Amino acid sequence: MQHTSCYICKSRRLEKFLDLGTQSPSDAFVREEDAGKAEASYPLALCLCEECGLVQLGFTVDPRELFTEYVYTTGMNNSLRENFTALVEELGTRFALGSTDFVVDIGSNDGTLLKNYGKFGSKVLGIDPSSVAEVAKKEGVPTLREFFNETTALSVLKTYGHARIITATNVFAHVPDLESFMRGIQALLSPDGVFVSESGYLLDMITTGGYDAVYHEHLRYYSLRPMLRLFSDFGFEIFDVRRIPSHSGSIRVSVGHKGAHLVSASVANLVAEEKKAGLEDLKTYTDFGERAHAHMKELQSLLLKLRHSGARIVGIGAPAKGNTLLNSCGITAQTVEALLEKSEYKIGLYAPGSHIPVKNESILFSEQPQYALMLSWNLSEELIPKLRAKEYRGAFIIPFPKIRIE
Ligand SMILES: [Zn+2]
């Protein structure tokens, strides 16, 4: 469905600044038996709302198509796991959580974040529509397999009462019906409660040039300015904001009902920083689009050149954004022979669009392909030493911020 108005301010003054053509949803890994069939694919492009400054996709895919067979599990990623532990520790201490408190995690995935509340004794509930919710349940994390919206919020409220903490990590940018989501938070959050959202941060995407953050599930690319407007429209106030490293650069906002918390200087400071970085100027975005297209050409020609010289190339990891990168650059299994993963959920599947097979990471050490393309490039500092310690001797290709080989 074409999305012709802004998710936040409803303006139709949307300016397209990056067009990635037509792509398959980047988490829709393909099973062996379906590999010969045509895949669904949809337009993928970024627009700027010239009214409120929100960056969003110009096309929305039915969420039931995107989230029900989700193969991503949070628990696999060390940096995210540590981020969640630190986040819950901080929230629990700052808001003196106890056993009478109720906390909710939206988009709870395999329950990784909620497990950290154990020491505070609070009652927890995960809400997640995907099949990964079953993994969480099996591990004893109470989880409701639903999309979060006003209806879900009201039924949770009836059963459990108000939530003192509601977290939504890497999900707030993915919700198609933003209004229903916001009304759900309004209803479920206690008067002194805090809603914490973590989303990929637009300024980091612009700075690193990482257009691979663009995929169909990811509807909005938040900066602080449009978020302030969004929350204010629903009677909320952002009282704290922090930049965090997750997912190549994210923004964590803490939100309460208007007037419930003291607003920290971090909010005005980051608004000023965004303005200084040009986030209010269309040219910043058109430049980003041009840089992205130049990057695609450069990466494609590098990989083709290496492959033609007879080198074997594999991808490290099979993250959603890796699929955007591979498909934007037109890379197939002829060039990158496999994506190597540790996640048992993805091994044996084929990457959407490119149909590059996902194989076990052990191949990297047993077969020593000459080049390893870091698709989770934001985790390079964590991953490369580990892969070297396991005696991979080839070269790493790191695609962002600038393509480099090491
Ligand atoms: Zn707008």
Image (spheres, rainbow, N blue to C red):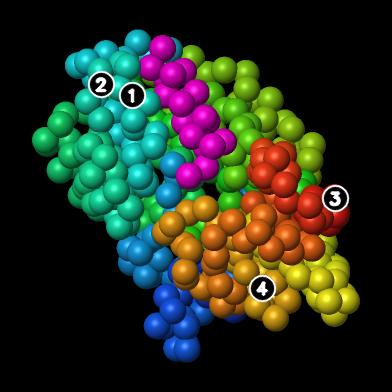
Q: Position of residue 13 (x, y in %)?
A: 61, 63
Amino acid type assigned to the residue bearing label 2 in the image: Ser
Would you say the beta carbon of the disc 1 residue lies within 8 angstroms of ligand 1? Answer: no
Q: What residue is at 46 percent from the left and 62 percent from the top?
A: 346
Disc 4 element: loop
Pick whichever of labels 3 and 4 is earlier in the sequence. 4
Q: Residues within 10 Å of mark 1 (few under 14, many from 20)?
A: some
Q: Quadrant of residue 306?
A: bottom right
Q: State how far apart marks 3 and 2 are (Cα).
A: 46 Å
With respect to residue 168, does 2 lie above or below? below
Pick whichever of labels 3 and 1 is earlier in the sequence. 1
Q: State how far apart marks 1 and 2 are (Cα).
A: 6 Å
The residue indicated by pointer 1 is 117
Pick whichever of labels 1 and 2 is earlier in the sequence. 1
The residue mark sitting in front, 3 or 2, is: 3
Q: Residues within 10 Å of mark 2 (few under 14, many from 20)?
A: some
| Residue 122: image tag | 2
Q: Nearer the viewer, residue 113 or 228?
A: 113
Residue extending farthest to the front is 366
